[in-house]
Each structure stands twice: as C-alpha cells, then as structure tokens.
Image: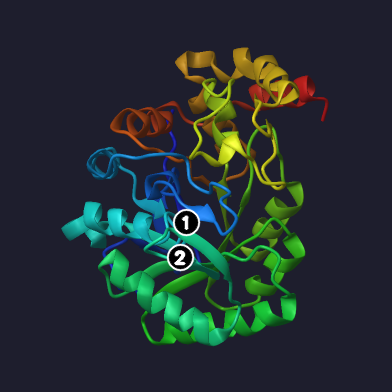
C-alpha cells in the first residue's frame, strides 16, 4: 500500500539534489510543519502565538529522525518563535540541507530578542530584507519554496510581490514560491506567476476546501495542508485546557475548534468521535487516519503536521506506510459529517 511522493511543479533552476520530475521536484507525500519547534512567542498585546515550551535538542533529534524516515519536505516561517524555528531547522539539517526541500514564509515583522510579533509589511523592499534574514538563520544560500504569509494581502500588492519572487528565482535565491492563504481568488493571483508551485491552506477531515483543491488542479499547484490534524484535535489528545504559552489556551478569532480558556470545542470533539472508527481502521492511529484522508482527498495534497518530539515524528511518518484511505472509507466520512 503506502504513499509515495508528491511533485512541486513549475520549479526554478535546481540548486539542490532533489529529484527533478516534469519540471518540478519530488518531495515526500508528508511534510513536517515547524511552527511548534519555534517555541513560545507572542503578539504585542501578550497573546501567545506558539505551542508552548520546547526542548531544542529534542527538536533537532526529531528533525533528524524524520530525515531517516524519508521526510524530505520541511515547512517553517520567519516569524515562528521570532526566527527561532528557522535557526533550529537549519541546525538540524546541517550537511543534509541539499537532501530536502525547505519552505519558509515572510510578511510578518517581529522582534527577535523579545520574541514578539510587531506588525506586517507587504512591501517589495521588505520581502528582500526578510529573505536575506531567513537565509542567514537557516544557514543556507537558497530557499526552495518562499511563501507569502499575509493571508489577506490585497491582490494588487500580491501581484507586485509575485513579481518580486520571480526576481528571486532569477537570482537563484528562491526556487519556487507560494501564497499561504485560504482564499482561492487570492491564490489565483500568485498562480499566474511562472514559478508559483503551490498554495498553502487549511485542510483537514473536519475542514474541507473544495474551492482551493479545484484551483490546485486547474493551475497545476501542490496543495500544502496546514492544520492537517486540526491543531491537535485529530490526535485525540486535546480535550482539556492547554498550557499558558500555547496559542490554544487563548485562541485568536481565526483559530476554530477551541474556546477561550475552555479547551476544545465540544461540538468539534463530537465530530472527531464520530469519525474515530473509520480513521483508526487498518491499524492506524487517529492522527494517521486523518493524514490518510488528506492523501485520499487529492493527489496534490502534502499535509504538514507539527511535531515537538521524536515520538511525534515517528508516529506522523508512520502514516506513509499505511497509505490513503479507500474511496469507501472517504465516502463513509462524508456521510458521517453530512456532506
């Protein structure tokens, strides 16, 4: 059975040893999201934006274990931990940098010493400054996939930033680019660029995105899936309140499935429970079943679950051997969710 690779198409001139295929680059069908390993950081008003405390040495071990298990795609952002996630990922990859595809993001402004998000900047000049800083933190001279991290940027401004990304590709600083947004119309603006390879958007078994998947199919983009485990709800372990430094303890308006100070939303937990039997079939854990649904949903999906430990890395990577859900299992999920 198992799940093989996915292709990020519309790729620039190769700078790493990734296997080229049809003008693109092949990556593992599962990527690893590096938000959590950035550790604690906050907004200017004290809203936690990380996933709580981390052990950097364990993070490094987890990244290296993922490499050994065949993971070749890692997604981070300059603002995760106010630069800390990029530093940890760069250190963990070390001499194996050329074996993987590294994606990062820009658009947010932050203060590294205080680990505080201070604003946003959608100017072309800032895009270049941000890229230069990310390259330094990652310890590399190119980014494989550079992603705009301002989900609601104006389309006219985004078109300018798309053109700036094309300049980065020409200069060999970036191999391809994408927009992290849940709006298909906005993503379509970036898709007009020659080297736009993907769109990053929310997608999980509880939150489908048919419009975005249709765009990916039409434009030949990879669908990079953030929140593939619904911020932990699809691991079966997030039922109560969360620690103070965790974004889920004081969820912002965009974070669905959690109530302020009350932990997981009971209605969301009820939906998870309704799907549990199907998702854990064939010896899968709940999380592995949620990832299997994503692979069955579209041949373009690349889920990027978060991780903070070797054990989490091993469980997530273990989903690859199980492969996607069957058509019958996917249909049963739709029936249970009434869609």
Crowding at dot 1, Cα within 10 Å, few <14 / some 14-19 / many 20+, comes out as many
Q: Quadrant of residue 69?
A: top left
Q: Which mark is residue 7?
A: 1
Q: Could you say which is closer to the camera, residue 215 or residue 313?
A: 313
Name the residue at 46% across, 52% down: 41
Q: Which residue is mark 2?
A: 22
Q: Quadrant of the N terminus?
A: top left
Crowding at dot 2, Cα within 10 Å, few <14 / some 14-19 / many 20+, comes out as few
Q: Quadrant of residue 174?
A: bottom left
The reply to whether residue 13 is visible in this rendering is: no
Q: Could you say which is closer to the camera, residue 5 or residue 79?
A: 79
How far is the residue under mark 1 from the one under mark 2?
A: 8 Å
Q: x%, y% of residue 56? A: 27, 44
Secondary structure found at label 2: loop
Q: Is residue 4 above or below residue 182?
A: above
Name the residue at 68% across, 34% down: 260
Q: Which color scheme is applied?
A: rainbow
141 vs 260, left or right, is left
**Circles 1, 2 touching at the beta carbon (< 8 Å):** yes
The reply to whether residue 165 is visible in this rendering is: yes
Q: Which mark is residue 49?
A: none
Name the residue at 29% across, 32% down: 310
Q: x%, y% of residue 302? A: 51, 47
Secondary structure found at label 1: strand
Q: Quadrant of the C terminus?
A: top right
- The mark lying in front, picked from 1 and 2, is 1
Give the mark nearer the N terminus: 1 vs 2.
Answer: 1
Q: Is residue 272 above or below residue 142?
A: above
Q: Is residue 149 above or below residue 279?
A: below
């Amino acid at each position: 059975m198992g799940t093989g690779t996915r292709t990020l198409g519309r790729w620039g001139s190769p700078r790493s040893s990734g296997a080229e295929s049809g003008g693109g680059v092949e990556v593992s069908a599962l990527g690893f999201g590096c938000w959590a390993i950035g550790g604690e950081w906050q907004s200017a008003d004290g809203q936690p934006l990380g996933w709580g405390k981390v052990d950097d040495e364990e993070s490094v071990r987890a990244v290296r274990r993922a490499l050994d298990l065949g993971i070749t795609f890692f997604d981070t952002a300059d603002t995760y931990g106010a630069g800390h996630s990029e530093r940890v990922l760069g250190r963990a990859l070390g001499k194996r940098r050329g074996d993987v595809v590294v994606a990062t993001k820009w658009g947010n402004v932050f203060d590294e010493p205080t680990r505080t998000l201070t604003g946003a900047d959608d100017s072309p000049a800032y895009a270049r400054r941000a890229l230069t800083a990310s390259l330094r933190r990652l310890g590399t001279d190119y980014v494989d996939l550079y992603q705009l991290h301002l989900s609601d940027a104006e389309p006219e401004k985004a078109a300018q930033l798309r053109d700036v990304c094309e300049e980065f590709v020409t200069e060999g600083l970036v191999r391809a680019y994408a927009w992290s947004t849940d709006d298909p119309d906005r993503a379509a603006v970036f898709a007009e660029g020659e080297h736009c390879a993907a769109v990053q958007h929310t997608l999980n078994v509880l939150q489908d995105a048919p419009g975005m998947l249709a765009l990916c199919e039409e434009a030949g983009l990879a669908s990079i899936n953030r929140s593939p485990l619904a911020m932990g709800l699809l691991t079966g372990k997030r039922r109560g309140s969360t620690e103070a430094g965790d974004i889920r303890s004081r969820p912002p308006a965009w974070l669905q499935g959690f109530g302020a100070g009350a932990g997981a939303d009971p209605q969301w937990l009820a939906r998870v429970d309704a799907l549990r039997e199907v998702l854990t079939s064939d010896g899968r854990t709940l999380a592995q079943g949620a990832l299997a649904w994503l692979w069955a949903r579209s041949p373009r999906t690349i889920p990027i679950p978060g991780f903070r430990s070797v054990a989490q890395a091993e469980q997530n990577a273990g989903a690859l051997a199980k492969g996607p859900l069957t058509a019958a299992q996917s249909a049963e999920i739709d029936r249970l969710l009434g869609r």
